[in-house]
Image: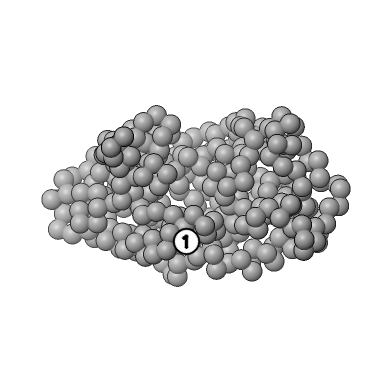
Amino acid sequence: MHKKYVGRFAPSPSGQLHFGSLVTAVASYLDAKSNHGTWLLRMEDIDEPRCISGVDKDILCTLEKHGLFWNGDVIYQSQQHQRYQEVVDRLLEQDLAYYCACTRKQIKAMGGVYNGHCRHLGLAPDSNNQDQFAIRLTMTRPLQAFEDVIMGNVTPIESEAPCDSPHQEASTANSSAEDVVIKRRDGLFSYNLVVILDDVFQGVNHVIRGCDLLDVTPLQKAVYQTLGYEIPTYGHIPVAAVSPGRKLSKQNRAAPVNNTTPKENLLRVMQFLGFDFPAASSFNDISALLAHAIAIWDRKKVVKTPEIIVPQHESTYYSEPL
């Protein structure tokens, strides 16, 4: 018996939705609805200093204006700390995780990849020096190639030394799985831990997201296996970029989605993903347009390229004076 499809969209409220994030929202929504599934919404606000007050409401408004209504309550990571800490405590008690005092400089001296130096040292911080230790998960599974339901076969790649930022650490895929940080020196929980704990908590079994996270998927799959959780099905779609290697993002001041033209926006999303689609004027309302999009959705038709260049006006970076 097949499990009911459960998908999700998980934006970070560090900025309003831009065209690239709308593409991800639409693709994950259509994949869920075309499979008669549930589409959940989660605010990935684990890195609270980067989040902007009120932006979560703006994101919800944009989704609603585009007819992208989610199932159930919105989960906020910032409200889940107790649940995360209980998992970390259990891992420490079971000797499946440990305290690590290695700095970035030391890891760089190791060749850029953490070599497990602190794994068996039995380090134990006290209340005076907790900020000198991260907590790492003892990885028991290697990184492996996998079949992405949109992009096809994906092979783990070599990378530079990992970064402690929750979302930047998503670039830490390597041919062998190093012991991944699950709680940082500054007390913030690791993105690579909470994204998995939240998907398990919400019962998510299908993840459709951007190709900017494609390289980290082997690492996250290895964490799933190490923790003993069932791995979801992954599919990655092209990201929108204003130039090669420069995806639309809050960092390059991507222009917010214009909520006054939802039909035109959804039409552009479908064309971006590779679908032939009638003119926006062909549909009386958003519901009719989305119903047609759901009916024609086919993963095989999605463009098989990691990124697609969009007009530079999508980023206000290019319209500001030098």
The N terminus lies in quadrant: bottom right
Check the image and tell me how it is coloured. one colour
Q: In this view, does 178 lie above or below 40?
A: above
Give the residue furthest to the front: 322
Q: Is residue 256 left or right of residue 85?
A: left
Q: Nearer the viewer, residue 34 or 79?
A: 79
Q: Is residue 93 above or below residue 120?
A: below
The C terminus lies in quadrant: top left
Residue in the picture at 68% in, 39% down: 104
Q: How crowded is mark 1: few (under 14 residues within 10 Å), some or many (20 or more)?
A: many
Regarding residue 57, the answer to whether it shows in the image is yes
Q: Is residue 84 left or right of residue 235?
A: right
Residue 293 locus on image (x, y percent): 28, 50
Regarding residue 199, the answer to whether it shows in the image is no
Q: Is residue 118 above or below residue 312?
A: below
Q: Is residue 243 left or right of residue 91?
A: left
Q: Mark 1 points at which residue?
A: 42
Q: Is mark 1 on a helix, strand or loop?
A: strand
Q: Is residue 120 left or right of residue 292?
A: right
Residue 47 locus on image (x, y percent): 54, 56
Residue 141 locus on image (x, y percent): 72, 43
Residue 310 locus on image (x, y percent): 30, 36
Q: Looking at the picture, which amino acid does disc 1 mark? A: Arg
Q: How many marks?
A: 1
Residue in the picture at 43% in, 59% down: 52
Residue in the picture at 74% in, 58% down: 130
Q: Is residue 80 above or below residue 136?
A: below
Residue in the picture at 51% in, 46% down: 234
